[in-house]
Amino acid sequence: MGPLIPQGIIDPAWNNVFALLIGLAFGFILESSGFSSSRKLAGVFYGYDFVVLKVFMTAVMVCMIGLLYFDYMGWMKLSSIYILPTFLYSVIIGGVIMGFGFILGGYCPGTSFCGAVIGKIDAMFFTVGLYLGILFFSVLYPVFEKIYHAANLGPVQVHDLIGIPAAWFAFAFLVVGLIAFFVVSKIEARAKKIEY
Amino acid sequence: MKNTAKIILTLLFVLIVLVFLFPGRDQLRYSLSAEEILQEIMEEDYEISPREAVEVVDSENKTTVFIDLRDPVLYHKGHLDQAVNIPSGKLLDRHFMKMLRNFHDEGLTIVLYGQDHREAVGPFLFLRQTGFHRLKVLKGGYDYFNRTAASGNGVEEFPELVPEEPRYDFAALIEEMGGGPGEFQQVVAQPVIPVRREKTTTIQGGC
Amino acid sequence: MKAPNRNDRSTRYLNPYLGGVLLGLLLLMTYFITGRGLGASGAVKSTVVATVNEITPEYAHRSNYYSQFISDDESPLNTWLVFEVLGVLAGAFLSGALAGRLKLKVEHSPGITAGTRLVAATLGGFLFGLGSQFGRGCTSGAALSGSASLALSGFLAMMGIFGTGYAIAWIFRKLWV
Amino acid sequence: MMMKDKAYWILTAVLLMLGGGLLIFSPAGKPDEVPPAELFRAMHDSSRFMCTDEVTRRIIEEDPSLLLIDVRNPESYRSFSLPGAINIPLTDLLLPEWGDYLRAPGMEKVLYSNDDIMAGQAWILCTRLGITDLYIMRGGLNLWADHILTPEAPPETASMELTDRYRFRLGARLYFTGGTGTGVSATQAEPIPVVRREKKTTIQGGC
C-alpha cells in the first residue's frame, strides 16, 4: 500500500505540507539531541562525546528494522521506496571530502541549519560555505561530470551485494551497533571532560 | 527528561511486544528457491505412473503413503488402498500438517493424488517448496489409476487421461476446418534485455 | 547526560538513544509517506540553482548541470527538500527556544580564536557542499537515509565521512580540543 | 555509569528482540516473495482460472490488455498456438529476460499449455515471486479445442444461455478457422455475439 504519496493514497498536493511537518520534527529532534553545537558534534572524533554516533546509528537501526517489518507485513515494499543509486567513485570521493568538511566545519548541512537558527555564528558561516561549495561544484560540473557518472552500479542494496537476506544483514548491523554503543560509552566515561 | 525517556521507551517496548505476539504468522518457510523447484520439476521424475502405483499398493513393505486430496465424500466413494484423506484446502490445518510431517519423518514417501492430475499440482509444489522432499504425484490422478487398475494387465492406455498430452493435432484440426496454418501469425517474442527499472521516477533523489 | 551545570537548562539535551529512536521513527514515517528519506543539502542546491537562474538565465539553461533542475513553469525552489528545510529551521528554533538555547555566539574551543573558527567553519562548509554533490547527498540524505534503506551508497558515504573524519582528526585536533 | 544507563539497555533489548523477530519471520527467499500461507490461499482461489470462452472472446475482440503466454516447448508452439501468444517454455520461465513480460503492468497474463498442469505450475512459481494479474486458461488447449473447434450442440430443450454460448463458439470457430467450417451451415454461423457486454457474465458462468 505504501508509500502513501507516490501510490496516490494521499494527494500529492499535500507533499509540501508534509515536507514542512516532517522538517519541523526533524529540526526539533536534531536540535534537542544537541546537534546544534559543533563542539558536541566534533566530540565523536575526539572521544569526549559520542552523541552523533548514538543518535545516528540508533536512527539507522530503527528505520532499517522498521522498513524490513513494513516490507514483511506488506505495508510498504522495500522495492517501492527510493534507493540512492551507487556511483562508486563519486560516492567515495564525496564521502572523503565530506569527512574533511566535517572535521573542519564541525557541522553537516542539516545540523548547521539547526545551529544557525538558534544563533551559532559559526553555523551560519558553515551554511554560507555550503552554498559556495555547491556553487563551486555546479560551475565546474563539466570538469567533474565524467567522474560523477562513473561506475554506476544502479540502486544496489548491500544485502544484494553480499548475497545474504536483508534481515541477517540488519541483525548483524544491529549487534555491531549496540556493541559500539557500549564501547563508546566506556570511552566517553574515561575521556577528559570538556566544557562547552 | 530522563523519566520521559524511560516512559517513552517502555511504551514502545510494550507496543512492540504486542505487535510481536499478535500477528501469529505461521512458521512456514520456503526451503527451496523458485529456481530450484523449477529445475526439479523439469528434470526429476516426481510422478509415479498408475502401473507403479498398483505395484506399490500390492506390495508388502510399506515405504509409501498415499494422500487423497479430494473431498471426503469422493474419498468415501472409493480410494486407493490405505490412502489417507487430506482435502487439499485443509492441507495447512495443524493436525493434517503434523500428520504429513510425521509420515515424512518416518521416512515414508508421500504420494499425492486428486481426481485428476491437476488437483495434485498445487499441493505438490506447495509442499515441495515448504520442506517435503520425499514427495511424488500419482500421474493422472485417481481417474487414470482407476482405469488402469480396472484394465488388469491389459496394455490399454488412456491417452485422454495422460496429463499434458495433446488430444488433438491442433494445427491439423484447424487446417481441416478450412483455415491454413498460415493464418496464425506467431509473435516470436524477443526476450527483452531487462532494463533495470529506474525505481519510480516520481520519487526524486535525496539531498 | 552530563550537564556541567545542573541548573542550566541550555545544555540539557535529549537522551541520545531516545533522540535516535525518534529520528529513526521519523525517517520511517517519511519513507512511508513520501517514499524517500530526509535530506538537507538538496535545499541548498536548489537555492544555488535558483540564484544562478535568476542572475544569468541563459547560462543556467545552457549548463548541463543547472538545466536538470530548471523547469519553465516552476521555481527551482519549489521542491520537497526546500520545504523540509524550512521546517527544520522552524523546528530547531522551537526546540532551541524551549530549552533556552537561543543565543548569538561563536562556539569555539578555547585554543583558537573566533576568527579561526569562522574561517574553518566556512572552509568546512565549502568542502561539505562540494562533497555532498559528489556523494549525491549529505549526512542526512546519503548516509542516514541511504543506510536505513540498505543502499550501498549510504554505507559507503557513511564510511567515507566517518572514516576520513577519524583518519584526520588528529591533524586538526587544535581546532577542537 | 554504563550499567545504570537504562535507556541503553532498554534500547538493546527492544532492538535485539525486533531484529531477532526479523530473523524468525523473514523467509529464506527473496524479500519480494509471497509468503507460503498467502500462496496457499491464492492457489485455492478459483479466480486464477480464466475459461476458454473468455479467453476466446478477448482474442477476438483484440483486447490490448491480454497477454497470452504459451508455456509449452518451442516445437509445440511453432506447430500451433493461440494468435498473439508469446512462448515462454516452462524451463525458461524464471530467466530474467522474461521478467518484463510477466511483470508488464496493466496486462492480464494468461498462461496455457495442452492441459492446465504446466500452466498451473508456472502460475504457482510466478505467484510466489509476486507476479500478479496472472491467470491460467482452464483446461488448456485441449479443452479450448473441445469448446471452440468442436463445440457440442446443446439439445433442443436447452436454455437460452446454452444456445447463446453454442452460437458464440460457432462464431469463434469461424474466426479461428477462417473459412467454411465442416458441418457448419451458413445459417448456423451467426455473427459473433462478442460485443454484447451483458453476455459476458453468462459466458463466464459456463466454465
Image (tube, helix red, strand yellow):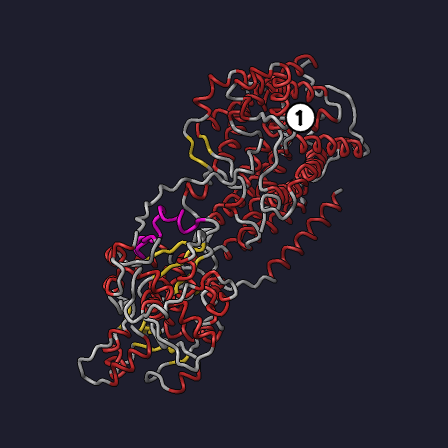
The residue positioned 65% from the left and 20% from the top of the image is A126
Q: Which residue is mark 1?
A: A112
The residue positioned 44% from the left and 23% from the top of the image is A147
Front residue of B176/D110: it is B176
With C149 as the anchor, is A122 left or right in this view? Answer: right
Element class at badge 1? helix
Residue D2 visible here = no
Q: Is residue C108 magenta?
A: no
Residue D49 higher or lower than C35, as above or below: below
Residue A61 higher or lower than C88, as above or below: below
Position of residue D205 measured from the top left corner of the image (x, y, whole percent)? 48, 71
Residue A85 visible here = yes
Position of residue C13 measured from the top left corner of the image (x, y, whole percent)? 73, 35
Q: Determine the chain carrying the residue at label 1.
A: A
The residue positioned 32% from the left and 53% from the top of the image is D88
Residues drawn in magenta: D86-104
Q: Is residue D90 magenta?
A: yes
Quarter of the image where one finds residue D56? bottom left
With B92 as the anchor, is B151 left or right in this view? Answer: left
Quarter of the image where one finds residue D191? bottom left
Residue type at the position of mark 1: Ser
Front residue of B184/A69: it is B184
Position of residue A13 measured from the top left corner of the image (x, y, whole percent)? 67, 40
